[in-house]
Image: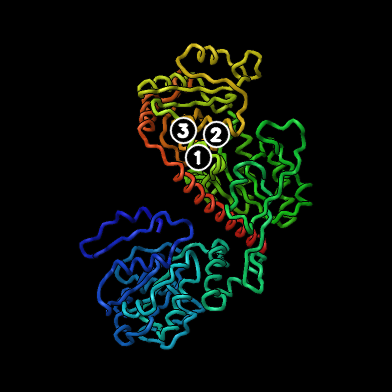
Amino acid sequence: MNDEDLRGLEPSPTVPLSVVSIPNCGPALPLAAARNLGVAHTGGHPDDLLIFLDVDCLPTPDLIEAYQSAAQAHPRDLLCGPVSYLPDVELDPITPGYAERLTRLCEPHPARPNPAPGEILLAGDHDLFWSLSFAVRREMWEYIGGFDEDFVGYGGEDTDFAWQAREVGIALAWVGSASAFHQYHPVSSPPVEHLDDILTNGRLFAHKWGQWPMQGWLERFEALSLVQRYASGYQAAPITVASVPGSHVYIRHLSNLDNAAPAIIRLPDPPPTRADTPVGAPWWPPAMLDPEWVRDCEADVFHIHFGFDAHSPAQLHAVIDALEVRGIPLVYTVHDLQNPHHEDDVLHSSQLDVLIPRATEVITLTPKAAEEIRRRWNIDAHVIAHPHVAEFETITELGDSSLRRQEEFRLGIHLKSLRANMVGIPLLQAAAGAVTKIPGGILQVNLHHDVFDEAGSRHDSELVHFLLNSDIDLRVHDYFSDRELFEYLAGLDASILPYRFGTHSGWMEACHDFGTRVIAPDVGCYISQGADASYSWRFENGVWAPDARSLDAAVLSVSSEQEDPVAEIVSRRCRQRNEIAAAHAAIYRSALAKSRF
């Protein structure tokens, strides 16, 4: 399930291994469907014995033989083997005698039977069935009907399977010699990251059997105020989040598309403390980043994204101190490991040294960023992808409006107001050369008036002279409105990110909303984020310039790619948004649980 590394696994000469994959199945793994699919690929005789073992379990050498012997003695029973839990220790390689070594380390599950080797306990309680390790003859499997594939994700499917077995008269037996070891991995108790799955599957189980399963977990969730109990059952309790900032498009698109009963309520941005807010950022500076605001806020969770550029480390410490007094957990999403607006990154690094270690939960957007966070702060960050930027109606409208011309390949570079991480003339020279090698190639360069105009606050006369004397399609304008930006991107075949440093890119995500290919530098985490092609930088004679060969190859690569259908883009982005929303809800609940224990 979602495990690309195993798809090409080859069988060994001694093990007739077959790998069956369910790719792209979303974050809620289809455990029931996967087990059914495995059985469907075995074929065979009604007397065959089917043995199921979870991926994190190690069998003892006697497990298969013990299940076979028990199945001969009790051919109509559902057989379970005891599973003992290993501690967080480094395990030696599996060599002869490993089972004896692991037996000395492990602890049996306190709530499950643990018969001695050679012992079989009959007439077991079906409520105690678990799917970590069990066996059943194919005839009985078909009599039970397999797992109910309406159950998706964590919890409920195995209890439903056992109850269905009991319903058709199949007894449960515990086989002492069919033991296995559960390898250590971090778990949360209660499993707040699976709360949505537990509620969904619990509701399905209750509809089917007349009562809710997993009562122990549900009662603990209720004690933590994560769920609410009604006459009709359990529902997720709403969580109020103060997002900094709340009105930014990134934060707006963290919500689930089904807004009938939102479990996450985001507070609106308070009025900023100054009237001259920047274009496109009416929330700046964020009034929430004030200890006084925190002391009176009604938030359950405080989530910082960006907007703290002007805050000193001491000011950030004061905000977090106020949160801790209120018992409000901090979630921090690391968008930037390096501030793209500042050549000198000392302040931003010192801000990260406050936010990352003191956050209850840390999120970032790419695996590469998570690796850097682990290296620098020894903290494991959750990786959640960047959501779509444009609204789905806009993606569909502009995607169907054929703004791209079939006879041309339009390559765009938007220099905006030349922020600190952008390179102008050297990149333009290399891009102009690359695009001439593509049939119908056109280089379009966009620039703001504050750089182009002589009276502009960021006027660059050398760049303007180059632009006016080059064979490019030059467009000069002020800050794009959202509509103008999206029309511009939808008219490009590809966009080059002119960044010498940085981390992640919302621009890349907006491009991908409209099927526009992105050529990104091999710095930061742009490749990890999903750039379609990349180029590299070189530093010679005191000047940064792109490597022309790598840029040529990148432009050639994206020029030959087929455009994704609009409906496919929208479907993919919708599915991704719901996954992103679910991941955030799980992290908020985890943060709340940690703050309330």
Q: Are marks 1 and 2 in contact (CB under 8 Å)?
A: yes
Above or below, 218 against 443 in this view is: below
**Label 2, label 3: how many angstroms apart (C-alpha)?**
13 Å
From the viewer's side, name the closer residue of 429 and 330: 429
Above or below, 68 against 563 in this view is: below
Q: Which mark is residue 486?
A: 2
Q: Position of residue 405 (x, y in %)?
A: 43, 28
Q: Earlier in the sequence, mark 1 or mark 2?
A: 2
Tell me which residue sits at (28%, 62%) in the image. Answer: 18
Left or right, 394 with respect to 7, comes to right
Q: Earlier in the sequence, mark 2 or mark 3?
A: 3
Q: Which of the image's four quarters has the N terminus?
A: bottom left
Left or right, 446 with respect to 325, comes to left
Image depth: mark 2 or mark 3 in front:
3
Packing grade of label 2 (10 A; few <14, some 14-19, many >=20) is: many
Q: Earlier in the sequence, mark 1 or mark 3?
A: 3
Q: Position of residue 362 (x, y in %)?
A: 58, 50
Above or below, 211 against 419 in this view is: below
Residue type at numbered disc 3: Ser
Q: Which residue is mark 3?
A: 402
